[in-house]
Image (cartoon, rainbow, N blue to C red):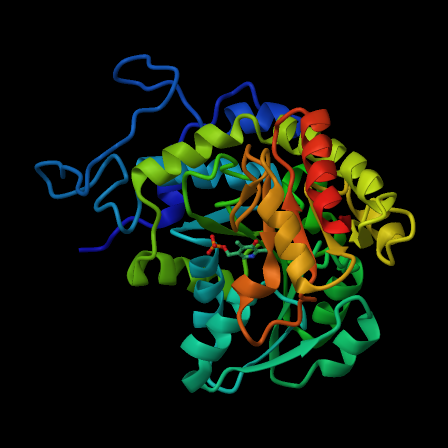
Amino acid sequence: MEMETTDRVHERIVIKNVLTEQSRIETLAVNAGRSIDQATGAVVAPIYLTTTFERDPDGTYPRGFTYSRTESPNRGQLEACLAALEGGREAIAFSSGLAAAAALIHSLKPGDHIVAPDDVYHGFRKLVDQVFGAWGIQVSFVDFTDPERIAAAVLPSTRLIWAETPSNPLLKITNLAAVAQIARKVGAVSVCDSTFATPVLQQPFEFGIDVVAHSTTKYISGHSDVVGGVLIGRDNNPLLEQARKSQQFAGAVPSPFDCWLTLRGIETLPIRVRAQSDAALRIAGFLQAHPAVEEVYYPGLEDHPGHAIAARQMSGFGGMLSFLVRGSAEAAMQVAGAVKVFTRATSLGGTHSLIEHRASIEGPQTQTPSSLLRLSIGLENILDLIADLDQALGRAIE
Ligand SMILES: *Cc1c(COP(=O)(O)O)cnc(C)c1O
């Protein structure tokens, strides 16, 4: 029996008619993908904890849903909202950010080639080495701050150019228009992992990027309580069609509750991200002036090498920054050990400010300096955050 196509399912997700082409991101964040529940009038969608859906007596599925791996109401709502936020045609939601990346790599053939940043998210490198290593996918890791190096790494077999900006944890900035242009010239698909920026601060499709990837675990869900990922396509493209098949037939899908929580978090995404970005800029300034700090990596600082591109390409510099503690790895560990308001934990983008010694979580292959600490700025009062860093850094000078 022929299943309904996903497009038909999406047509059934009623997008509130308050939305127009001109709706701004705060309005989309609250309304896109949502509808009033037809059965009860509930303003907030129920969590559809069902694996399966009833057929009509004639054997058809008139409501568009058959089985919750292939499509589910909560996932459809989340995908409609994410596509609207990014200004894309279609979003494909996964059970993690790396599952989203894996689905895109799944769509390649043995021998196909990827160009990726040398400081790409460390999990991406593990994915291509340890999961796809035996599949014959070729990957070149190069410095993405220099478009000439990206262009020089391209081969006739290059199918995917994977950018990540700002990057993790050095906050390097990639020129997205240059990446899109290089990809177009060789017929490759350009991807931007926009997790650090979010659609609030950066809209990669404006620069010609084909696919946007996010770990929705971070800012998009925003409360450190759900793991997820998404791929969003600007237009139709064959790699994304394959990624949809990977979602539906390989099945790394988010649960209805995951989708509901993520959509709930998105309502405040624009407000959270702007507040976190403003606070991070002030904290970067504070750290830069501190005698126990050797260097600060934040694209909002005028002496950051990517500042000019970030200022053009983003509407704020984001809530993430890193810095080097003067002295050794031990001094950095000591600072991390002394914070009281910041929480020592990995991950980012939630309401709690986090501090992390990156090199020790990334493992022995890491390129990250051993005295680097990464901060994810949350929603606490900025004065409390600065006072906390000040007292912790004070220990390092003692
Ligand atoms: C966390 C993260 C990922 C991976 O996402 P998961 O949801 O942890 O699988 C990918 N890219 C960036 C930039 C990240 O921060």
Whole-percent x, y for residue 106 in the image: 43, 71
Evaluate whether residue 107 shows in this view: no
Q: Which residue shows up at 41% across the image and 76% down it?
A: 131
Measured along the vertical axis of the image, is residue 395 above or below residue 331? above
Position of residue 118 in the picture relative to residue 111 (left or right):
right
Evaluate whether residue 386 shows in this view: yes
Q: Which residue shows up at 65% across the image and 34% down it?
A: 273
**Residue closest to the eye, 242 or 125:** 125
Which image quarter is the N terminus in? Answer: bottom left
Q: Which residue shows up at 67% across the image and 56% down it?
A: 332
**Residue closest to the eye, 205 or 48:** 48
Whole-percent x, y for residue 55 in the image: 14, 39
Whole-percent x, y for residue 303 in the image: 91, 52
Measured along the vertical axis of the image, is residue 230 above or below residue 148? above
Tally of numbered discs: 0
Whole-percent x, y for residue 173 in the image: 77, 57
